[in-house]
Structure formats: C-alpha cells, structure tokens
Image (cartoon, coloured by chain):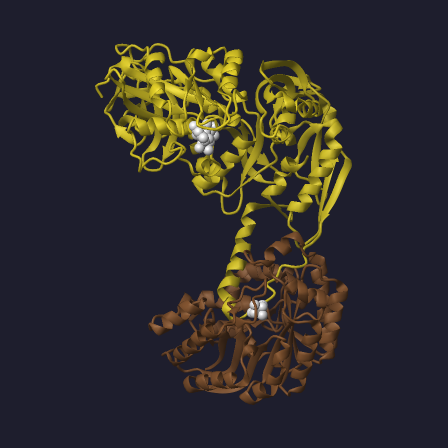
Amino acid sequence: MGVPMKNIRNFSIIAHVDHGKSTLADRFIELTGALSARELKEQVLDTMDLERERGITIKAQTVRLTYKSLSGEDYIFDLIDTPGHVDFSYEVSRSLAACDGALLVIDASQGVEAQTLANAYLAIQNDLVLVPVINKIDLPQIQIEDSLEQMEHVIGLPRSEALLVSAKTGQGLPELFEAVVKRIPPPKGSPEAPLKALLFDSWFDSYRGVIVLIRVVDGELRTGDKIVLMASGAEYEAEEVGYLMPKPVKSGVLQTGDVGYLIAGIKKLSDARIGDTVTHRNRPTEKPLPGFKDAKSMVFCGIFPAGESNIEELRDAMEKLRLNDASLQYEPENSPALGLGFRAGFLGLLHREIVQERLEREFGLTLITTAPSVGYRVTTQTGETVEIHNPAGMPDSSNVTVIEEPVIDAVILTPDRYLGGLFKLLEERRGVQKKMEYIGPGRVLLAYTLPLNEVVFDFYNQLKQLSQGYASLDYEFVGYREGPLVKLDILINGEAVDALSLIVHEDKAQAIGRGLVERMRKVIPRQQYEVALQAAIGKRIIARETVKPFRKDVLAKLYGGDYTRKMKVLEKQKAGKKRMRRVGKVDIPQEAFLAILEVK
Amino acid sequence: MRAGLYIHFPFCAAKCPYCHFSSLPWDETSYRTWRQGLEREAAAPREAGYEFDTVYLGGGTPSLLGPDEVVWVRELVQAHFFLKIEEFTLEANPVASRTNFFGGWREAGVTRLSVGVQSFDEAVLRTLGRPYTAEEALRFCRTGRRAGFDALSIDLMIGIPGETPAAVERSLDTALGLEPDHVSVYILENVEGLPFEELLVRHPVDEDAVVDAYDRIRDALEAAGLRQYEISNFARLGKECRHNLKYWRYEPFIGLGPSAGSHLPGRRWCNKTCLDDWADALSRNETIREDVVELTPSLAAREALVFGLRLVEGVDLGAFTERFNVDIMALFGREINELVAEGLLVLSAGRLRIPSRNFLVSNRILAKFV
Ligand SMILES: Nc1nc2c(ncn2[C@@H]2O[C@H](COP(=O)(O)OP(=O)(O)OP(=O)(O)O)[C@@H](O)[C@H]2O)c(=O)[nH]1
Ligand code: SF4
Ligand SMILES: [Mg+2]
C-alpha cells in the first residue's frame, strides 16, 4: 500500500474488563475513517452475538487502519482489541505476541484493577512498549490523580507518560494517535530474510474454509506462494492474502511487519495450529518462532450431545471451534451414564459457558455439560502419579496414597474499606496471605495462595458482593498441594452416576452433598416415577432427597379455537425433552448437572 | 353433514386478570361494531353443505345480551345457515341484574345455560377478581335452574392461589346442591404476560393439592351421577354438551365473531382476534381468516387422536383408518405399544383411550403424537 515498514505501528489495546478497550477501538476506526458513521456501531469489533448480548469482548479482533499524522506522513495502525476478562487472557497473550506495543487503558473511575496489572506484566514480559491511557475522563467526579498514582506505584509507569482520553467523546484521541506514532516502535524484521510469519488466530468460514491471521516477522508472502506450516509440516499454496480493514480487503502481498489474513485451502483443521510459523517451501526460515505456551486449563467438564445431536457433529464442531479458541482443550471421554463425549478444559467458568453457547449457536447443537471440576493429582499405591481431569476417573480410595489439588496465586485489588469482609472470605476459602500492600491512598493489593477449587466456584461473585463491585481478582496456577480430599458420588435411584461425581474437601463434603441433592431436587422435573437422589462418600450416604412423581401435566381446557395453541404447547413439550439426558429411567436437565454452581 | 355453529361475543363487564380469551370491557360503540361485523360475516359466502344442529353463543359474557338481542342473533344465523337446532348453549356469568332474563332467553330458543361460576367460595372469587359474591352466584344459578332449560352447566375452577381443601369442598357442595346436569372443572392455567402471572409466581400452587382437589371433585360428581366424559367435563347421561363434543371428536364446526375458530374437513383456521381488525376486514370484504392450517390426512389424524384421547370414550382406531385413510398403528405403533405397556393407554376392542386416572398426566401421552 505504499507505506514503508517504518510507518507501521502494530499494537494491542489491553485493560481490565470494561475499561473501554472496544470503545477506544471504535474511536480509532471512526477517526481514521475506516468505517463511516453509518457503518459504525458501538463496540463494532465485538462481532459475535454473544459479545453484543453480554457487552464483553470474548475474541481478540484485528483491524488495519491508515492514519495521516500531523507531520503529513501516512501510517498504518495494526490494532488488536483484546478481551479483559480473566477467562480470555489467552487471547491477550496471543495478541501481544503479534505486536510491538500496547495501549494500557485504565478507567479513571475505577483505577488500576487486577487485570490491568496482569495484562501490563504480560506486555512487559513480551518486551512491548506500553502507552498508558487514562480513559473515561468525561465522567463526573473522577480522581484522575488516584489512577495516575496507582499506575506509577504498582506498574512503574511514570505519570507523565499517561494520555487522558474519553473513548466516548473522542477527547484526547488526536494526541493519542500521535503518541502511537512517536512511542510505539515500527516492526523490526528483515524484508530480505526468508519468510517467517506467526500464525496467531484462525477460524472456519463455511465458504472459504480455514482462514488464518498472521503477522509477518521476516520476508514477504504473496498470493500463489508455496508455503509450509512448520509445526505440522503441511504444505499449501497461498490462495488469498489481505488485510482486515475491518472488512477483508485482498492485497496480493503481505510484507514484513504486516498483519493480515491468509487463505490457503487448509483441509486438515489440525494443521492450522495457533502459534505455528508460516514459511516458504522453497526458501524456509531456519528457526521457527517460539510459538505460544499451551493454555493451562483451570476447570474441566464433560460435554455430551443431547436431543437430536450426535457425537460426530459434536466432534466436528469442537474441532472447528478450537480453531478459533486455542485455549479450549479436549479429549474423548466415554461416560457409562452419558456415552461418548469429550472432557474439555477451560480457563474458567465463563469460558466454559461461552464454549457451550458457541457450540450450540454456531453449530446448531444441543448439549449437556457435566459438573465442572478442577484437575487433581493422585498418587497410587504403586507410586504412580496421575492427573485426574474427571472425578469419575479417581482410583478407588484404598488404592490412593496422596491426592493433591491445584493451588493458585491470587492478586486482589480493593479499596481498603472492604478488607474486613474479604479477609473473612479468603480465610473460609482456605487462603494463605502472602502480601498486603497499599498502592495508593485507600487502595490495597492482596496476594494470597488459595486452592483453585475454592476460587473457580462462586468466589468471584462473593468478592464482588462484599466489595460492592470494587474489588478485582487475577490468579495464576502455581502447583499442587496435598489436601484432605474425598470423592463425592451422586446416586440416582441407587446407582452412582459417573457424570455427577465430584471431588471435595473433607470438611465441606457434608454441606456440599446436602446442598447438591437439594438443588437437584429443585431442578429435576417430576417424572413418571419417584426419583431418589443421594449423596455418598464411599458407601456412606450423607444426604438424600426425592423428586416426587408428577401428578399433573395436562391441558385442562380445550375448545374449538384452541387447536393451534394447544398443539403448540404439546410440540413444545416434546421439544423440551431435548435439553435433558436420560440416565437409566430418569430425565436429567442441564441445570441438574450444573447444580454444584448453585451450592453455597 | 352435521356441524356446529359457534358465535363469539367478545365483551365482559370487566376483564378478569387471568383471562386469555378475546374479550373487552363492554361499550356501546364496540357492541355496534360487533353487530355490524356479525351481520356481514353471517352473510358472507362460505363453504356449503352443512347442517347445523348445535349453536353455541360463547364469549366473553354473552349473558350481557338481553332476550331480544339473543333473538336477533338467532334470526341472523337462521337467515344464513341451514339450522336444525338440537342444542343452543348460552354462556353466562352470574350477575344479579340479569336474573330476569332467563325466561326470555328460554323463549329465544336457548336450551342450555352454561354458567361460569368458577367458585362458590368468597375468598377464591376475590382472588380471581370475579365481579360477584358467592351469594349472588348461588341465586343466579338457582333462578337459572328453575327457568326450565334442558340443561344447566356449572364451571368450577381449581388450582387458584390460596384455595384450601375446605373452599373446594364448599364450592363443590353448593354446586351439587343445585343439581346441575353438567359440570366443567378447569385447572387455572398460567398464561405468560397476564396480570395474574405475578400472583402465580409469588404463590405457586402446590401440584399435589390441585390433583387432590380434582380427584375429590371427580369422585363426588361421579357419585352424584355426573359421569366424566372428558378430561374437564362431567354430565348426567344424555346431557353431555353436543357442541363441545364436536371439538373433541374432531367434527366440523364454524365459528363467527372475532377470534372464533373453525374446522371443516381438510382445513381449520381462526378469525382475526382483534374486534376492530375483524370488523374492518369484513367492511372491506377482505379475509378475516388467520392461522389457516391445511390439514393433510396425517396431520388431521394426529390432531383427531390428540383431541379424541381427551374423551373417556377415547378413539375408534378402525373408524380412524376409514376417516383419514391413515393407519394409526403404522404411524405410532411403537409409541402406542410403549404407552400401553406402561399402563398410560388402554387398547381394547379397537378403541384407544387414556384411563381416567391418567387424565391429569395426559400431556405426556399426547406429546408423543404431535
Ligand atoms: N462515560 C464513558 N463511558 C465509556 C468510555 N469508554 C467506554 N465506556 C463505556 O464503558 C463500558 C465498557 O466499554 P467497552 O468498550 O465494552 O469495554 P471493554 O474494555 O472493551 O470491555 P471487555 O472487552 O469486556 O473487557 C461501555 O458501557 C462503554 O460505553 C468513556 O470514555 N466514557
Ligand atoms: S368473564 Fe370469562 S371471558 Fe370475561 S374476562 Fe372473565 S374469564 Fe375472560
Ligand atoms: Mg471489549
């Protein structure tokens, strides 16, 4: 496009949830004229229905913009809008690997929060230049000073570097554009070297097949070039390359420093591996890029087809979704109760929920997912150590010498007035304090070690509740720790159902078992026969509930004008069965499998 | 071919909070709109070849109509339909001021009075927001009883928040004291979006209590000689509602008035629900039919099965094959056998039926056939 490499600026927008990344991206798109006002809607890069419904970014999105600087020169901005939620942090780390700099956005009404820190560190680890941006300065009664001080204190960014903007009104954006030009370095690669490009995102398009996003580090890639995906060794021909502006625009060539898409008729989905290096077949680069670390799954659950869906459709859908979500991991599972399915690993419960919704919406499937659980490490009598991603797979207790649970280091940022409640919560959750530090007036950073199991379930809601929404949390896996853990079985009509088993802390087993069967009684609809629900540890029954057989399921009135309406009611009833799976003679709805999420 | 004629009168003194029927508060202008519309609809060209032996004036609250107006309705349909009336039902709500109408209605040709009492318990009536007291209801029914109709029917409703077994008992006793020929027992249905929904959400009605009330009422009615013949309907021998039987036996009927449904061989439909839309379309000679469903033999057979199984008599499978040219056993043999094995259906002497003890779980059975 006639813009020299030195005028390319490649950066991500990173921040804590809701601090205004996508809105800031809107202003970049609008003020550089990539989309007309008519085409622009709020958070235009949040293209998924799920993102728009929930008002959060789930997928990082790339867009190429052209900018004429005050000095009159043309620049290319390759911008990546990233998600802020912890569960999608893998998107951030992928994006940062394709960048030379990052805008660190801080909501002036909230200050530095946990993912502000986490994402800032991530950028620093990637040797990226950080441009701090204080956003939402249009809001009344905000303390910009506080944000600046926290930023300086915990992240070590001098306050003089911060730009003050409103992504809503556009105030401060011209200065920010100039700062991007001046502070973020141009790409460093060598145009003469053999092609070396980082494959950092991909998706499946039903018309075009696999589309991948690449960042060209060295060399250039032209339409028609023969290429190799280095990790898999698969060879293809580049059928089309271009830029996302944000609509795809064919360019015929991607040059050093460019970020763009590549369509290469990739047949085997597993060939398109996130983090892989793309090079030329005839003149390959010597060393592939380091790629990405695999995402560390935090929670696991089973995914099974229900209703009309079958395992082949599910397998195909998982493969295609995985193209677009590299943090999703899975392996086949065969459950005695639910048959063939997959055991999948997620970065958190929101991630789990989003994956299920995407599978159902984008691939038209009906699914049942089983109780989420963290992974455990078990050492058996024979001295063997295994990782257990499924409580049902736990060896018999007589054969187990040690059970270890995953532990995390958590960072919590909070106004100090909520400390009392938070200390109590953290203690209940078996937390051990490592650090407590004031990072500004009235604002505290807490570092704790906690069992992961205590954090993935309901902890976040409690944290938000106790702090009126002000405390924020980030965590990372640090290792395993031995604990008094037991397997809790759920029996339906006397039969243990593998898909409902859990591993819990001994002290809490009783309460959880009771809460679980009680919740299940509420969500399992009455059926033709009585359903007995029991919670058991080994042979010992610790709780019991019954679902009484239904007695009333009737259209009490039917006259001439009602035919259509009544037929619809019956059709709906027939279809309603879809979201259930039959275990023995009992129909179990999705909510019953997720009962653990509602147990306090 | 015999058929039923339904006429919808879309007005009530006031709208009940649980009502999902097409009914508006009464006002003079709307009433004139309805009359004019009905004149046009009755006169409009339509499918021929039917002989109407039952007429049902329903609503709404058609008992708001005085005897002269009922005569007007009868004469209107007489002018345009081939009538051989054997049963003429008028739906009524107990309103004290109308008790002097009974003789006139009788003379206008009404043979059957169906009173929407719902309950004879004061508290329940108040919960339902019905505009009369238990005392007024009783007086209304008594006078109606004495007026000499061929049949008096009483509607009772159960499953109402706050309803106690004692209230059900009281209502039932009072109803039986009137020696009705026919009783309909309805379970209050929650329809989304109605004012009543909030109450039902706040005070959910216990499933067991409703079923107990229903069983109690059924047993008492049977003991008093009112035989169950449909999920919600009980009658002395020969006093079954012939018009309503057409709905369950899937026999033809034509409905006039806003929201009225019609069903003729091969097709069913509903009229536009909104009074003004219905009347406007008629004045412009446009169609008032909505939700027109073309009934393929297979769909007709399925519907006939679903609705016919509501009857104690069930359905005659042989007659089915003849009527729809569809072999039900070929279509649903597996489902039927399973349900029979579970005791949910009975198949004997070529008839398929739901044993009455399973009526209250009939959706589960019927959903297999849609
Ligand atoms: N008043 C004001 N509101 C803003 C500004 N920027 C963003 N918002 C609002 O803040 C909310 C979150 O904005 P988003 O752009 O979706 O935030 P995000 O950082 O992309 O959120 P995630 O992607 O979910 O992490 C929205 O309601 C925006 O309208 C601003 O400058 N001023
Ligand atoms: S009287 Fe009947 S039709 Fe009229 S509003 Fe009440 S329930 Fe509806
Ligand atoms: Mg966003």
Answer left or right for A148 relative to A260: right
Asked which quadrant contains residue B86, the reply is bottom right
Q: In the picture, which chain is yellow?
A: A
Name the quadrant where ligand 2 sits: bottom right
User: Residue A499 at x, y = what percent?
Assistant: 62, 37
- With respect to residue A478, does A374 lie above or below? below
Q: Choose between A90 and B329: the one closer to the eye.
A: A90
- With respect to residue A185, does B362 lie above or below? below
Answer left or right for A263 relative to A89: left
From this viewpoint, is residue B334 visible? no
Rendered residue at 30%/28% (across/down): A245
Answer left or right for A190 relative to B304: left
Rendered residue at 54%/26% (across/down): A347
From this viewpoint, is residue A514 visible? yes
Instruction: Point out the residue furthest to the front here.
Output: A141
- With respect to residue B80, does B188 lie above or below? above
Instruction: Point out the residue furthest to the left here.
Output: A2
Count of numbered labels shown in the rendering: 0
Answer left or right for B127 relative to A348: right
- With respect to residue A275, does B23 lie above or below? below
User: Residue A270 at x, y = what percent?
Assistant: 41, 27
User: Residue A234 at x, y = what percent?
Assistant: 35, 22
- The quadrant in which the N terminus of chain B is found is bottom left
User: Residue B151 at x, y = what percent?
Assistant: 63, 83
Q: Choose between A347 and A181: the one closer to the eye.
A: A181
Q: In the picture, which chain is brown?
A: B
